[in-house]
Image (cartoon, grey):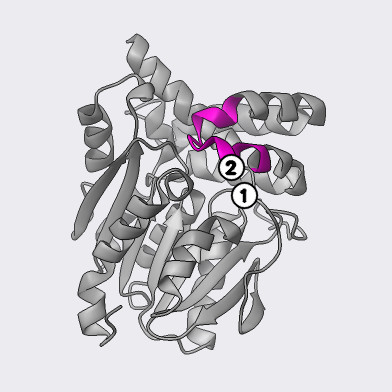
């Protein structure tokens, strides 16, 4: 029971602490920057299309290492959600963030005539990718989900529903909005070590916290905790690759984390799993080489289909 509680606390911390951008709000070298709904998209490279969606309040810069590896062979579309990482906030009338982002990306794909892109999403970005795949099944060719579950409240209560999750999520949002900046900064300094094992990235993660719009972060957190996408997974008609983290410091056996992810994605018709050990939530920052190899391996079937071989 103590070990289970420890892993639940770890992921509870993740819901707050992933609400920090990575290093800067600057766009990567790009051929264009387009705005669609509550997202902006920077493009770079040439080849088959890949759309990359960062997590809750993260900057698109979290993909910098992966983007450098993919850029010579793919056209990358790096998403930035409004209100995160110092970008101007755009509050939805329903106080949602992920769902409008999914619709904005779907509109962007159609408007720009992008043919069957691969969608890669981390954390909240993974939920956005699942929404897009389930609600617009003809748009993407593959989803790569990075350390994200289709229903985050399973971390606290395996029997949870969207309805039973609402009180906890409401309390969480209220507390987040009421937390003074000084206390938030102090708490993030203490907890970021549980989310990024790579010590070199921690100071930037902490210092960038205040660049995100607090209301957007709070609303997105509530949405994450109350949105159960498991009933929609069967609508996804393309392969889903789930890459997730594990470290012995979680305090539970790796098999327990395996079981959590496998059960959560049980309704997915075409799903494959890849666990990356020795990493916390920000896998792409903790294990960039292994993470990039995992993504490239997941992309291999699409390389032959799209006539592009790095």
Instruction: Answer with left or right where residue 246 lies relative to residue 122.
Output: left
**Number of numbered discs present?**
2
Q: Residues within 10 Å of mark 2 (few under 14, many from 20)?
A: some
The residue sitting at 41% across, 79% down in the picture is: 74
The residue sitting at 45% across, 39% down in the picture is: 281
Disc 1 designates what residue?
22
When asked about the image quadrant of residue 159, the answer is top left
> Is residue 168 positioned above or below 162 on the image?
above
Element marked by disc 1:
loop
The residue sitting at 21% across, 56% down in the picture is: 271
Q: Is residue 18 visible?
A: no
Q: Quadrant of the N terminus?
A: top left
Disc 2 designates what residue?
201
* Between discs 2 and 1, the one toward the N terminus: 1
Magenta segment, which residues?
191-204
Nearest the eye: 183 or 177: 183
Say whether residue 158 is magenta.
no
The residue sitting at 74% across, 43% down in the picture is: 214
Task: Assess whether mark 1 and mark 2 are in contact (beta carbons under 8 angstroms).
Answer: yes
Q: Is residue 245 visible?
A: yes
When asked about the image quadrant of residue 222, the answer is top right
Element marked by disc 2:
helix
> Is residue 184 positioned above or below 66 on the image?
above
């Amino acid at each position: 029971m103590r070990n289970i509680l420890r892993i639940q606390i770890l992921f509870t911390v993740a819901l707050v602490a992933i609400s920090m951008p990575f290093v800067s709000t600057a766009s990567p070298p790009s051929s264009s920057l387009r705005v669609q709904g509550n997202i902006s998209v920077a493009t770079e490279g040439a080849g088959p299309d890949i759309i990359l969606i960062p997590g809750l309040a993260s900057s698109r810069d979290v993909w910098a290492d992966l983007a450098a590896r993919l850029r010579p062979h793919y056209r990358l579309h790096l998403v930035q959600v409004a209100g995160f990482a110092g970008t101007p906030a755009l509050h939805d009338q329903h106080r949602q963030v992920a769902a409008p982002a999914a619709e904005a990306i779907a509109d962007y794909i159609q408007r720009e005539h992008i043919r069957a892109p691969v969608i890669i999403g981390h954390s909240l970005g993974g939920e956005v990718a699942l929404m897009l795949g389930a609600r617009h099944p003809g748009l993407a060719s593959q989803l790569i989900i990075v350390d994200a579950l289709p229903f985050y409240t399973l971390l606290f209560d395996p029997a949870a529903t969207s309805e039973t999750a609402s009180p906890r999520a409401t309390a969480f949002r209220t507390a987040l909005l009421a937390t003074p900046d000084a206390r938030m900064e102090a708490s993030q300094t203490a907890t970021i070590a549980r989310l990024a094992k790579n010590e070199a990235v921690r100071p930037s993660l902490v210092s960038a916290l205040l660049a995100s719009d607090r209301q957007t972060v709070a609303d997105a957190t509530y949405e994450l905790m109350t949105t159960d996408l498991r009933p929609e997974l069967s609508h996804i008609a393309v392969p889903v690759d789930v890459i997730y983290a594990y470290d012995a410091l979680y305090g539970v056996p790796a098999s327990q984390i395996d079981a959590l992810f496998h059960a959560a994605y049980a309704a997915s018709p075409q799903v494959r799993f890849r666990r990356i050990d020795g990493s916390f939530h920000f896998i792409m920052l903790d294990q960039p080489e292994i993470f990039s190899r995992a993504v490239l391996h997941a992309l291999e079937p699409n390389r032959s289909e799209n006539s592009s071989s790095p």
